[in-house]
Image: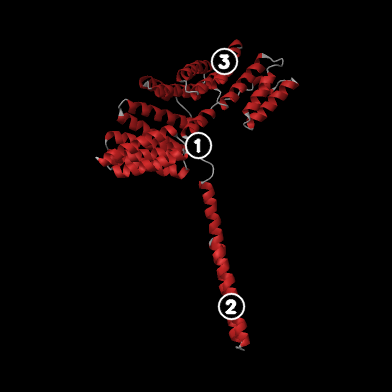
């Protein structure tokens, strides 16, 4: 808009100047005077053009920033959870990597190409066709796992679980622990994605047994942590504590720093649910140092929020507010909408506990705006309940 106004202004000044110079020539004004007018006119036009270019550039910058803020919607909290679990699904190609059967190689390659393009329905159909060929047990087993993985990405968890169990049967027939480790891990994740916690727990225990046979201590450490996490989700805090402690007793490497921090954080959450606030605080602080060391800003913000909740439980509202504010600062920096919303809810909760209901309502509304942006429906209802509660308190 500004660039258009300035352009019109330049043209207007140019017309007036041409009229003025023409009038001066008719009145036979001195040549030096007219020359000075021309120079002044030229300077004015150059300045206006520079200003115009500057506004155009600023306009473009504003448009770009608008495109960024109004571009692709951030993932919802549920989508973020699914993405994390999906990232842990393992492929197993085994004998398919070196099969000498041309038709099997063709189906295998084409199916993988579709998977890479995230065309999971097409990949699944090709793998199904491959099952009609004459396959060895190893080749069939690999296709079952690939088909299960495609079904998981299509959110057809029951079908995925069925394919994995067929792979498990072949893995047991051939005593192939490497295959069984992949199968049980994928089965646990498929059950988790389908929110079947007992099924996830059963397969994590099966995985634990296989990993112990293989002497895979890092895998055993992570699986114990996962078992503890599932028990935590089930609300069985004593069992969660047992397995999280077992996980922490197994030494890790520098590469396991994030897993170690996550395990400490989960155990701290268990302690908090049992009312052991000091023990929980110590573990959260240890986890915080590890996340900071690893440069994991997202989990750093999460732990800061957890520490804030403990101080809130202790009644130290000033410290609670400080930690929630630090978490919000990090989540804002990394652009984590769901994290920001949780931080704003926590800040609102602290303010509500301190009976500053007006400010609490303000922070709940800010959180609600973000949650609506990411379509986090369960959280939206929760925050709306908070808003209604503080509005009622304001009227009292």
Q: For residue 129, what is the image quadrant?
A: top right
Q: Which quadrant is home to the N terminus?
A: bottom right
Mark whose residue sits in front, 3 or 1: 1
Residue 13 in the image: above or below residue 152: below
**Label 2: which secondary element:** helix
Residue 386 spot, x, y in % from top left: 34, 36
Q: Residues within 10 Å of mark 2 (few under 14, many from 20)?
A: some
Q: Which residue is mark 1?
A: 75
Q: Residue furthest right?
A: 102
For the point 30% across and 39% down, the residue is 390
Q: Residues within 10 Å of mark 1 (few under 14, many from 20)?
A: some
Quadrant of res 148: top right
Residue underneath mark 2:
17
Q: Secondary structure at mark 3?
A: helix
Residue under label 3, please give it: 165
Q: Position of residue 356 (x, y in %)?
A: 28, 43
Most extreme residue toward the top is 173
Q: CA distance from mark 1 to mark 2?
A: 58 Å
């Amino acid at each position: 808009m500004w660039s258009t106004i300035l352009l019109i202004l330049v043209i207007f000044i140019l017309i007036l100047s041409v009229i003025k110079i023409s009038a001066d020539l008719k009145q036979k004004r001195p040549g030096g005077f007219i020359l000075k007018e021309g120079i002044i006119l030229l300077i004015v036009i150059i300045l206006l053009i520079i200003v115009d270019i500057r506004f155009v550039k600023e306009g473009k910058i504003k448009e770009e920033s608008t495109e960024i803020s109004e571009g692709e919607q951030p993932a919802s909290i549920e989508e973020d959870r699914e993405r994390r679990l999906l990232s842990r699904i393992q492929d197993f190609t085994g004998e398919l990597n070196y099969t000498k059967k041309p038709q099997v190689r063709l189906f295998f390659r084409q199916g993988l190409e579709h998977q890479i393009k995230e065309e999971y329905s097409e990949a699944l159909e090709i793998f199904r066709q491959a099952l009609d060929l004459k396959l060895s047990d190893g080749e069939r087993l690999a296709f079952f796992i690939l088909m299960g993985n495609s079904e998981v990405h299509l959110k057809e968890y029951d079908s995925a679980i069925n394919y994995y169990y067929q792979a498990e049967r072949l893995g047991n027939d051939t005593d192939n622990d490497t295959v069984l480790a992949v199968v049980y891990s994928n089965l646990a994740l498929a059950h988790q994605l389908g929110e079947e916690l007992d099924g996830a727990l059963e397969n994590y225990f099966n995985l634990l047994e296989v990993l112990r046979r293989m002497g895979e201590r890092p895998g055993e450490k992570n699986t114990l942590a996962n078992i503890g996490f599932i028990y935590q989700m089930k609300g069985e805090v004593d069992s969660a504590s047992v397995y999280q402690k077992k996980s922490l007793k197994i030494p890790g490497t520098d590469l396991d720093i994030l897993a170690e921090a996550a395990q400490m954080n989960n155990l701290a959450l268990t302690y908090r649910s049992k009312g052991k606030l000091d023990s929980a605080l110590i573990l959260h602080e240890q986890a915080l140092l590890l996340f900071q060391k690893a440069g994991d800003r997202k989990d750093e913000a999460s732990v800061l929020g957890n520490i804030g909740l403990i101080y809130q439980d202790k009644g130290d509202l000033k410290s609670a507010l400080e930690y929630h504010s630090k978490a919000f600062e990090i989540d804002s920096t990394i652009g984590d909408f769901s994290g920001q919303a949780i931080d704003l809810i926590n800040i609102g909760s602290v303010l509500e506990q301190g009976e500053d209901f007006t400010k609490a309502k303000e922070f709940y509304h800010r959180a609600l705006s973000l949650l609506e942006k990411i379509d986090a429906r369960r959280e939206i209802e929760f925050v709306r309940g908070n808003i209604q509660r503080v509005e009622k308190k304001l009227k009292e």
